[in-house]
Image (cartoon, rainbow, N blue to C red):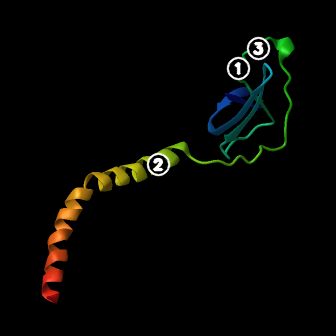
Amino acid sequence: MVHIYDRDMWNLASENQQLAAINYKDGFENMLISIGLNDDIHGEKAVWMFPVPANPDDVVIDILKGFPLLQGKDIDTVYNTAVGVSGLFMAGYSTFPLGSLVALPFIFVGQMRTF
């Protein structure tokens, strides 16, 4: 939630994007948080409030100038591709005997013509 100071009052601003990267190691959580705000925000000061599930003495907050570029694969796409390939394989395997029966008459007819 972002509050923007505008001379005589604080207004609530809407966020259009929120990104987070969390790394948990040795009992400590490092979290990078970034938000995107609308372009029509006017004001001199802003406050961004977010909950931190820890004692205030255990929290260290730094302001970074950028957010790292993270790359990876979309798990839905990977799953759908794997299931789709497996499904085609199973469908082909289960209909293999039918394919042989359909192809056999044409093979015999072709051989009979050569006699």
What's the residue type where badge 2 is placed?
Answer: Ala
**Image position of 79 (left or right of 97):** right
Q: Which residue is mark 1?
A: 51
The residue positioned 71% from the left and 46% from the top of the image is 70
* Residue 42, above or below 61: below
The quarter in which the C terminus is drawn is bottom left
How far apart in space, not on screen, are marks 3 and 2 (Cα)? Answer: 41 Å
**Image position of 88 (left or right of 73):** left
Q: Residue 60, how many percent across, how many down?
A: 86, 23
Of badges 1 and 2, the one in the foreground is 2
Of badges 1 and 3, the one in the foreground is 3
Give 47 or 85, whichever is nearer the viewer.
85
Give 114 or 23, whichever is nearer the viewer.
114
How far apart in space, not on screen, are marks 1 and 3 (Cα)? Answer: 9 Å
What's the residue type where badge 1 is placed?
Answer: Pro
Q: Sequence order check: which comes first, mark 1 or mark 2?
A: 1
The residue positioned 62% from the left and 35% from the top of the image is 14
**Image position of 98 (left or right of 71):** left
Q: Sequence order check: which comes first, mark 3 or mark 2?
A: 3
* Residue 10, above or below 19: above
Q: Which residue is mark 2?
A: 82
| Label 3 Cα neighbours within 10 Å, binned few <14 / some 14-19 / many ≥20 | few
The residue positioned 86% from the left and 12% from the top of the image is 57
- Element under disc 1: loop
Q: Which residue is mark 3?
A: 54
Q: Residue 15, how many percent across, how many down?
A: 64, 37
The residue positioned 69% from the left and 35% from the top of the image is 20
How far apart in space, not on screen, are marks 1 and 2 (Cα)? Answer: 39 Å
| Label 2 Cα neighbours within 10 Å, binned few <14 / some 14-19 / many ≥20 | few
The quarter in which the N terminus is drawn is top right
The answer to the question of whether label 1 and label 2 lie on touching residues, with beta carbons closer than 8 A, is no
- Element under disc 3: loop
